[in-house]
Amino acid sequence: MTVGIVGGGAAGLFLGNLIEGATLFEGRDRVGKKLLATGNGRCNLSNLDMDLGHYHGDPDFIQGVFQRASQEEVLAIFSALGLDLLTEERGRYYPRTLQASSVVNVLRKGAEERNTLLTDREICKIRKTKVGYDLEDQAGERYFFDQVVLACGGRAMPASGSRGQGYDLARSLGLKLTDIFPGIVQVKTEDPFLKHLAGVKIDGRLDLLVDGKLQSSYQGEILITKYGLSGPPILDTSRQAISSYRAGSKVDFRFSLLNGVTNFQETYDYVEEKTYQHFHKSLEDFLQGLVHKKFIHLVAKTLQVKRETLLENLDYQDLRRLWTLLSAYTMPMSGHLSYDQAQVTIGGVDTSQIKTNLEVKNHPGLYILGELLDVDGDCGGYNLQWAWSTALSAFKAIKKDS
């Protein structure tokens, strides 16, 4: 039974360490390029908190895959491969070296030892025959396999080789795809002060508001950029924000200009009290001890008063606007960055067509793994865990058939 694996990313490489005698095709000059960039170069490969609420897609399908290929089994395989892991305070698993290259090197070596690994071989066409699958690469060379595994990745980080070619292969076989868009990505916002504030960081609470209603809240470091917002809380909420924005809803991000905020009402009360304690000070002198210096310009311009204006000379409406600006500043969403900056692709092959062993229902011997499917996880190692588990689940099915 011959097996062809299309894609040398996380899922393809992991499968290559489980199976023997397969042929693995990678369109770029080396495997694992996207893996090298994950976790800021440290490769956050899983998470202690495996609540399935961290995944988005058909919950029954997701649960079925993890029942066949659990996190415990995956971590045991990494241990057997000689990759030592550690967890940090947020529950994220990393290689003990804290280098993504360690993960890539271990997986690459294992895949090469067990299988034939062909780089610079992008599979452009796939054709189903009566007895298997006919593949064709960019040079027109053809290969035949009894079973084929599509592990090409999505469209996120196209520089790594994930340019959506797997979707084209799936469509050519008549498979349905859901709407596809970037996920775990920075957002664009409308704000007149972005250029001035670019580079400012705030450590605190971020609220996502959709049509004026609170949808979610995250704590962490929020980064203001020249185009909008970035940082862990933004990446965590980006999926929900982008989905709502694409559906035509009004999406806003709310955060305090003060660091360390967890409750906006308490912060409003706090800055109100501080104002009266320092009523004799100028607006600029008052803000110097509260917020980043760049916010002084924002506040003065928004209130349309001079920096040297004494707090006691502001009318009550301006004082209320001041307290609201400081405690709960709002930026409306105007878009998001592209696949170049995204960590994952939302959407993909409709999983109603796929068994939990990752075999396509109407195409026996064809398996689809990882990001190609209409399943995505939150930021924090969940998407790599999905790649590992889909690969393991497919391997069990292939091994049974061999």
Image (cartoon, rainbow, N blue to C red):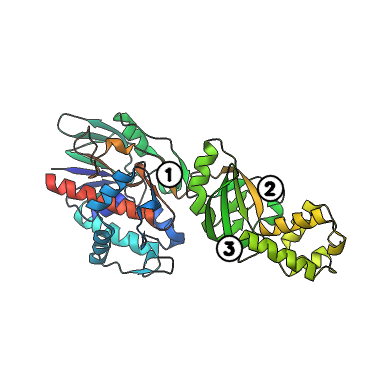
Residue 248, image quadrant: top right
Residue type marked 2: Asp
Query: Which residue position holds label 1?
Result: 345
Q: Circle 3 — which element?
A: loop
What separation in Å lies between label 2 and label 3 (alpha carbons)? 23 Å
Q: Tally the numbered discs.
A: 3
Query: Which residue position holds label 3?
Result: 262
- Ranked by sequence position, the earlier of labels 2 and 3 is 2
Residue 273 is marked as: none
Q: Is residue 263 above or below residue 15?
A: below
Q: Who's the residue at 57% across and 59% down the image? A: 205
Residue type marked 1: Thr
Out of 131 and 235, give the one closest to the viewer: 235
Q: Residues within 10 Å of mark 3 (few under 14, many from 20)?
A: some
Query: Which residue position holds label 2?
Result: 191
Instruction: Please state which of the two labelled residues, at mark 2 or mark 1, is closer to the viewer.
Output: 2
Could you tell me if residue 291 is visible in this image?
Answer: no
Q: Who's the residue at 52% across and 37% down the image? A: 246
Q: Who's the residue at 29% across and 30% down the image? A: 173
Residue type marked 3: Thr
- Ranked by sequence position, the earlier of labels 2 and 1 is 2
